[in-house]
Amino acid sequence: MTHANFPFLILASKSPRRRYLLKQAGVEFTVIPSSFDESAIPETHPDDFVRILAQAKASVVSEQYPHSWVIGADTIVVVDDTILGKPASKTEARSMLTTLSGRVHRVLTGFSLCRLAQNRHYAEVVSTDVRFKILTPDEIEWYVHTSEPFDKAGGYAAQGLGAFMIKHIYGSYSNVVGLPVCEVVECLVREDIVEFMPGGRGTEGLRMKDEG
């Protein structure tokens, strides 16, 4: 649903995974990736770090579209209180997977929802524990030679080939993929952005509210 002058709801992310998850939930939105430079935020406590990043990403787009609702998000992998980003090389990917092998790590996604014109701001961090199997050197070597590790926090994709490494997930699966759908939709309903229509079938049962 759009207004003549601005999109009603914007996803401030170029991530195809977040776009897919939100679309699968039946939410209508426009994609306008945030230009925020992630390196501008110094690392701090992981929960604070990922929340600040999500808020900053949403704020950049919200400044351009102050009458729109904007969703920003960021996902990180944490082990031993150390943040694992996206590996820049096979060596880094190999090191990350070796560190995660046979252990439980946390996947944190911060998401932010804001509408600047109304001074409406909300942010939340969702945490999921993930246990990896013990990886053999051959398994690690095979995986780092695929295309998956290099644009994923922690160097793996739960929704892709990397699924073979995951023994258990304790919490939200969609959070591990990149967006905690349950919490995001709850927030959209609570903020009166979407509503469930009784009698609707599939995505027809979820409707964007009038932007007023």
Image (cartoon, grey):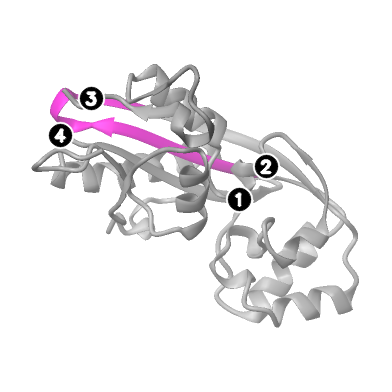
Label 1, residues with CA under 10 Å away: few <14, some 14-19, many ≥20: many
Which stretch is magenta? Answer: 107-122
Measure the C-alpha gap from mark 2 to mark 1. Answer: 7 Å
SS at mark 1? helix
| 92 sits left or right of 53 in the view | right
- Give the spatial CA distance, label 3 vs label 2: 31 Å
Across and down, in percent, residue 28 comes to 36, 41
Can see residue 124?
no
Give the residue pinned by disc 1: 177
**Mark identifier at residue 209:** none
Residue reaching furthest left? 5
Residue pictured at 46% horizontal, 46% vertical: 23
The residue tagged 4 is 67
Mark 3 and mark 4 residues within 8 Å of each other at the beta carbon: no
Give yes or no for contact between labels 3 and 2 (Cβ–Cβ under 8 Å): no
CA gap, disc 3 and disc 4: 13 Å
User: Which amino acid is tagged 3?
Assistant: Asp
**Disc 2 element:** helix
The quarter of the image holding the C terminus is top left
Depth check: give the residue in front, 23 or 197. Answer: 197
Residue tagged 2: 173
